[in-house]
Image (cartoon, grey):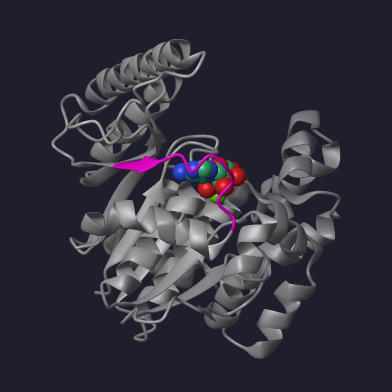
Amino acid sequence: MTPVIICCGAGGVGKTTTAAALAVAQAQAGARVVVLTIDPARRLADALGVRVGSEPSPVALPPGVEGTLHALMLDPKETFDRVVARFAPTPEARDRIYRNHVYQHVSANMAGAQEYMAMERLYELSRDGRWDCVVLDTPPTRHALDFLAAPDRMANLMDEGVMRWLVLPASRGGWRMIERGSEVLAGVLERMVGNSTIADIAEFFSAFQALWDGFRERSMEVRSLLAAPTTRFFLVTTAAPAARAEARLFVEQLRAHQQPLAGFLLNRCLLPLPAPGAPTFTAPTERPPGWDAAVAALAALHAAYQGRLQLQEQNIDELIRGTAAPVWRVPDLGEAVQDLEGITALAEYLRPAVT
Ligand SMILES: Nc1ncnc2c1ncn2[C@@H]1O[C@H](COP(=O)(O)OP(=O)(O)OP(=O)(O)O)[C@@H](O)[C@H]1O
Ligand SMILES: [Mg+2]
């Protein structure tokens, strides 16, 4: 199977940034890499040359890089359409689903659709044959690791609760209940399918029935891709104590899913200062006014930095306690990382993570 790298973590910790940097590091190591980004910031998207709905587009890397890098941006709706096209028994069945209002709503808004489609697109890329490595950025999920459960949830959706009940013929009570106007049900439906009519809903489920087996089968394949030894999960987090609880939750959830953790990517870290050696400057024999004060201020700055560094390292120790996963420290560049130069600068710190 094609090796896969997945960058997961809480919202805003730097998943998209580090996924791009890991992809660059892989290309520098000579691989043909594709990175699937999720909602990258506009300027980063421009720098990578990705647009919604685009196929993988080549990213121009500095001369001398042996491998290649392509990038694309997840388009959940377009991916959903492709899944439907693949599993629909006939072009007419496919078009019936495309035209259906419930489908149009569900494919664009359903909770979890983005996670599921990220998995689906990852699977497609891993089967494509053109790549030595696929790097996946993940969506900012409300619940940690939602995306891991997405394939199962999508398959179950069709079997479970309201859904199963909805396809019951009216004579068995299903539609009659709706017609009676249960408020709870109306609420559930509103959330699920927006302002669709009952006829739309009925048609959606009857048209979708033909696709269920395909969905279920695909979800098994995605699950085995995620469980493959060639699939590696990196947890992106910061060293701040506030990030720790959320990061630990990820670690536990990965464990519950029996997914080994390939490493912690500690983003926005302070890096150790060079070891003190011989002074690199000589104090002038005649000290200008303010010299001593300036030297004292510098020494205080240095001590404060060392203090913060020590605190950071304690936080990192707390975070990784009980896990055997290695840690990579990625520095804070001080400004948003929105061009290839910044991404390449971060890739330097991720090199050993790619081998
Ligand atoms: N090491 C870094 N140094 C400086 N800025 C960084 C660094 N890492 C990330 N950033 C900046 O932090 C912001 C958030 O990063 P990013 O978009 O990668 O996070 P994310 O985890 O993908 O967020 P979301 O959960 O919303 O998808 C961006 O503006 C990015 O440029
Ligand atoms: Mg992101």
Q: Main secondary structure of the magenta part?
A: loop
- Viewed as shown, does residue 27 lie left or right of 105? left
Q: Can you give x and y, in whole percent of width and height, for residue 165 in the image?
A: 62, 47
> In the image as oriented, which residue stretches furthest toward the front?
286
Q: Residue at x 84, y 43 (%)?
A: 179
- Figure quadrant of residue 256: top left
Q: Can you give x and y, in whole percent of width and height, for residue 187 in the image?
A: 77, 35
In magenta segment, residue 168 = no
Magenta extent? 329-338
Q: Which residue is drawn at 34% across and 78% down?
A: 65
- Figure quadrant of residue 38: bottom right
Q: Can residue 169 be seen in this view?
A: no
- Viewed as shown, does residue 314 lie left or right of 10? left
In magenta segment, residue 336 = yes
Viewport quadrant of the N terminus: bottom left
Compare residues 170 and 194 and report the one nearer the observer.
194
Q: Can residue 89 be seen in this view?
A: yes
Viewport quadrant of the C terminus: bottom left
Q: Residue at x 74, y 74 (%)?
A: 98
Above or below, comparing residue 83 to residue 243 in the picture:
below
Q: Can you give x and y, in whole percent of width and height, for residue 89 in the image?
A: 57, 84
Compare residues 28 and 148 and report the one nearer the observer.
28
